[in-house]
Image (cartoon, helix red, strand yellow):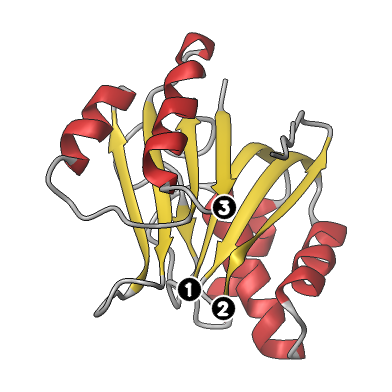
Amino acid sequence: MCGIVAYVGHRDAAPLVLKGLKRLEYRGYDSAGIALLDVESPGSSGLKVYKKKGKVVDLENELAGKALQAKIGIGHTRWATHGAPNDVNAHPHESHDRRLAIIHNGIIENYATIRQNLIRKGHVFRSETDSEVLIQFIEDIRKETGSSLEEAVRQALLEVVGAYAIVIISEEDPTQLIAARKGSPLVIGVG
């Protein structure tokens, strides 16, 4: 069963998100990943995504020695439903322009139809997951309508069939987490 963790605040996000992922290990999973948004460090390129097949400790080993400064981050433990358990299919997933990242628990039942429509528009997918389809769908709506990220998420979710809990971060607003759920649990803590 998937687990999702997110943090935005004044503390370093990476250790908090990794600690949260460790607390979710009892749920069972085949891969883990985090996305961090660093806009404060000189020369930062913003969104950084790290993901690994295996356990959270494997992800931590992958992160060893990397600069992980960020005040916002999301993390995910995945139990494969669409796509094989591997590094590419692990979450988080990025939009095509790599400015948005999503973590997702649930199943998007009509992802194949949405994916085919996006491919006809020129989208290229790196993974086999319904989650990557969802973030690229949100990105596509934003580009076509000029709407805000929040509105694009609302519009996309109106067309999605299935159950989900999602959290999205964006380079455009490094102080905001966008979360939504339908039929899957999502708990939010403040403070």
Up-down relation of residue 104 to residue 66 (above or below): above
- For the residues labelled 1 and 2, the Cα–Cα distance comes to 8 Å
Closer mark to the observer between disc 3 and disc 2: 3
Instruction: Name the residue located 66 percent from the left edge and 52 percent from the top edge.
Output: 111
Q: Can you say which quadrant of the picture contains the C terminus?
A: top right
Callouts 1 and 3 close, C-beta under 8 Å? no
Residue placed farthest to the top in the image? Answer: 26
The correct choice, above or below, for 127 with respect to 170 in the image is above
Q: Earlier in the sequence, mark 1 or mark 3?
A: 3
Residue that mark 3 sits on? 9
Residue 99, numbered label = 1
> Front-most of 100 and 39?
39
Q: Which mark is residue 186?
A: none
Identify the residue at image location x=74%, y=36%: 188
Residue at (17% x, 51% y) in the render = 66
Q: With 139 as the anchor, is 30 left or right in this view?
A: left
Q: Nearer the viewer, mark 1 or mark 2?
A: 2
Question: Which is more N-terminal, label 2 or label 1?
Answer: 1
Label 2, residues with CA under 10 Å away: few <14, some 14-19, many ≥20: few
Q: Are marks 3 and 2 in contact (CB under 8 Å)?
A: no
Q: CA distance from mark 3 to mark 2?
A: 16 Å
Relative depth, front residue between 121 and 191: 191
User: Which is nearer the N-term, disc 3 or disc 2?
Assistant: 3
Which residue type carries mark 2? Glu
